[in-house]
Amino acid sequence: MDDCTLEKLVVKPGKLSPNFQKNETEYSITVASNVEKLSVDPLTSDSGASYCLRFEGGGGGKEVPLIEGAVVDVRIEVSAEDGTIKNYYIHAKRLSAKDATLSDLQLTGGKLVPSFSPDVMYYSCLLPCNVANVTLKPVAPDPKNVVTVCGEKPWTPTLLNVGETNIPVEVTSADGSNKQVYSIDVMRKQVPRYVKIVDASLAQKYECPYSLSPIYRPITIRGSDPKHTYSAPNLEEKTRTNKVDPLSGMPFGKDWKIIDYELDKQVASTVAKIPLTNGGFSSEGKIGALAADIAKCNISPTAADVKDKFKDTQAPINHTVQVRKWEKNLHKIFDETDVTKLRGAGAEFVEKYFDSLPKPGQSRQWTEGESPLDHLENASFFYATAIKLKPKDAYLHMRLGQVLEERYYAEDLFGLKKEEEAEALPSFNIQAKESSKDEECAAICKLRGVDAATAPIALQLKAIDEEYHALVDSGQGGKADHVQGLYVWKSKQASQEGLAAQKAQDEESPLGQAYLKYMDALSLDEAKAIYNFHVGRLLVIQGNFDDAVKRLEVTLNWNPSHQLTRFYLGLALALQKNGPGTRAKETIGYLVEAMETLLTENTKASMTATDPREIESELHSERLLRSTNVHLLRGIVQLGCLLQRNSDVKDCMSPQDVFHSSALLAAQILPYVARGDGYKQLEWVLLESHAHLLEILTAVKDNPNTSLIDQRCQRLSALIINSTLPMNEALLSLQERTCQKLVNIQPCNSHSLYLLGLAQFAKYENCPPGDKAKKIMEDTLASFHACIDMEGKPAGGDPPQKLTEQQWWQDKVKAEEEAKKAEEAKKAPPAAKPGAGGAAKPGAGKAAPARGGAAARGAPAARGRGAPAAPARGGASVRGGPATRGGPAAKAPAGKTAPPAAGKAPAGKTSSHTCEATPPKTSDKATSEPAKEPPKEEPKQEAAKPAPTGPINRKTHPPRLGLARAYRAEGNMEDAKKYYNEVMVMAPEVHDACIELAEMLAQSDPKGAVDIYCKFPISDPPTFDDGYILGEIVRLMMKAESYDDTRLAKNMILYGKVYGLAVLEKYVKILEAKFKNKLLQEVYAGVNGKSVDDPDMQAFFKFKCWL
């Protein structure tokens, strides 16, 4: 009687969505453009019920007329016998013949992001690295639509590039008048192993500047010359806040990013092989196909048998378990006394921590008390309270240590932060953990005339060292020891151990607190291997490698099969001051095992579609085998170093391939971690890997591949310049040596000279004032000027004089000449007359140059640049500088020795040695003949000297900016101003020149500073970078009370548009006090994008009493 439902609902043509169910009342259907009518045939559940179709323009019948390109709503009114009514709705869409959309799109083995919608045209998809092709399944609603995938029929497999592949799905409307393209970017995960391209020239061409492996998802910088291409993840990470080319330092232009699909395709078709940790290689094949068989590269590592090996190792524990102040502050649970329940609650909060960790692309905002750090804090409360009730439970101490250590990694690697309230616990006040020592260091620096807020670490350490020696000299030994401790503490900021080493020893840091809890656990149960392991591991983090070795050996005595203990022992042995010594091969075995295990784990992960940004749901201390564990990567670098020194080790990857692997691993993980301590240590790994590979290249005598050396030098220099590492002696020295090698190969290349100038200026900035600093500044200015002088000239020929006059160049030339002489002496034949005795040997050995030895020495020095005129006057002249400066020495009269700095073996000196092995008369004749040769031959050499060749050096602004900064640092403000102005003319969009010049003028000439700022071309709309300049203009003009200057209103408006009206509040109060109502009206109206006469504005001005 009251059943008003339908049992069936049939429509023709087409199919309802969703499928019919009697309790579902809303349906939709889409039909082809040529369907004019829709047949609707309902069947009621109750034979006594009735129905009626109602739609716009009609009703009653079973056929519904459809309108092309429109939706017709059909209502089916079902009436039961008792009068109860129920409505069903069908939304019927007849496609337009001009419609070119899809109704569905799927692909095999992957998931579209975002989910498919007919109106969304762009999608991405992440696939495992071993997926070589993909099949797209597009569905068009109209059978008359023509659909193609990459120009082929749908469901045709598409071969994927090794990185990113763009797959266009083109849809043509039924009448052929309209086309629409859906674009799908399919990305394969990066291969986690170093892929070695077989062809050396292609390997160099396709090498990523960061990873030194084949480029992954290449992005080319538009307009870069030479072409600069980077792996997408690394470039995107580096350019989030700094929109400049990392290699050239040039700012990006409009639409600077080119996703280079064609280059990706070329890389995929390049033949390569994968080095294996056992010294072998995978089968050769195209890179795109190699990834499909990546699992075959996994090798079961050989585990060293260490049973009973360390049974005699003694590592006494000198530690007392105590409840420290910070731990007392964690006793926050007062309503529970059951240790088991407290322990369980702590574990629950750890699980909540994992659940609340941000997913890729997810907003990092949580409700109060529900952030990941809140959950870790609560977990620490429960574990600390459990320890209070059961202080002898070693496991509870370890568990609290693990939670505290996770707190450190959550902030350092994941970038999670928590706003601290006034009553926040000291144990979690991360800002306070180093404040006392930092303040002491800053105070000492101030006493020594160094501003710790701006001075580099090298100068701060110099000031602390001076204070230490002053205290020692004055007999204040106690204070001197304290200052020495501060020096050691501060110096770790500049070491590879970095701030992590400091924090692991600092009781106010979660990492230092974790170490203490591990020590508490160990003190309570010395025989437990896991407690020994965590203590040994934290000792490695502290940089206390000697103690770490003993503690880890004890761990292996208790548990010989613990793999990560073997690794950390190997790392500690390698990092000891004197290295592993006689235990080198043992160390290599431990490190190789860990390297293969890590690569195998990464390979397995790469064969899943899991986003690499996703944070793993395991405590770091419980799963240390991950790429974010920087010590694993440091171990791989140390492995490469040990293999270099132990060439007799067999069945192991070559040192070069090891360093390539460490560079790849670091480059792969850097884009996904926050810029904390771990990030800096990863940068160190990357720099070390690059540096070792460069050293291997340059160690090859007369290496013909100078272009690769040049490329590697430029890339290493760019890495150093763009790193976040604090400058120290090691880094400064590496930067300078790298640039010197680069200039050695390309002494006439203006960019190489510019990089050398940068390296020298960095050294100057970290050098205390004095003669040494003055000399460094002279070289800095010379290099920048040499760079500018070479602009517009070929990047070949003789080195510029401003380069050859630098001491390092002269020392290099002298060393090369001495090495060549020594080599010639070894090659020289014995004396012709057997009876000549001892006097014949020196004569014979040094007479070689007179027989053409000088020409032979010239060839190696050319380094592939082709300078045939030089050999007649000595090898070094081929390099450039000595040829011009050494000319007079070559022309020296007989019997006179050329100046040592020229590095020559003059004719006079050669003939005098010949004289020793011959009778006096012959000697005189021999001496007189060579003396006439230089004047005769010199003109011929100059005439035969080829014109400089090579690409023309372009005129650029970076060397002028470098000169301006150098002159400013030197105190030469006039020249600094000159070059800043040149930069502003050449590259007006560069913020730095404008800001630095204005800052230089602000104290003495604030009006001039405003004029400089106003020259900068502000973008429309203004950017956040522009906002700083706008703010400075407003600040200076308000300070000068330039209220009537029309530029004030203009810049206040732009400033407010960038940062909002809040930034103008303090200026508004000043203007109100000065009754500058007209100016205020103009500014407020401008920021709101309205005219002053706007009614809303007028009402506001009246309210503010500005009218």
Image (cartoon, rainbow, N blue to C red):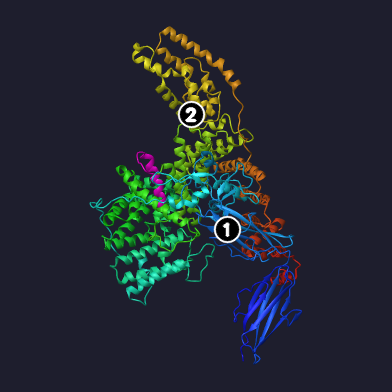
Label 2 is placed on what type of residue?
A: Val
Bounds of the magenta segment: 632-652
Name the quadrant of the C terminus: bottom right
Q: Are marks 2 and 1 in contact (CB under 8 Å)?
A: no
Left or right: residue 529 versus residue 859 is left
What percent of the width, then of the height, locates residue 620?
A: 40, 60
For the residues labelled 2 and 1, the Cα–Cα distance comes to 62 Å
Q: Quick one: SS at disc 1?
A: loop
In the image, 874 versus 706, the foreground residue is: 706
In the image, 1005 versus 1102, the foreground residue is: 1102
What percent of the width, then of the height, locates residue 601?
A: 42, 55
Asked if residue 598 can be seen in this view, the reply is: yes
What percent of the width, then of the height, locates residue 1041?
A: 66, 57
What percent of the width, then of the height, locates residue 500?
A: 41, 55
Q: Residues within 10 Å of mark 1 (few under 14, many from 20)?
A: some
* Location of mark 1 (residue): 135
Specify which label sits upstream in the sequence, 2 or 1.
1
Which residue corresponds to the image point at 59% horizontal and 65% vertical from the top-left?
115
Which residue corresponds to the image point at 68% horizontal and 72% vertical from the top-left?
13
Please identify the residue farthest to the top as the structure is shown: 921
Q: Count numbered badges in the picture.
A: 2
Label 1 is placed on what type of residue?
A: Thr
Q: Residues within 10 Å of mark 2 (few under 14, many from 20)?
A: many
* Location of mark 2 (residue): 813
Q: Of circles 2 and 1, which is in front?
A: 1
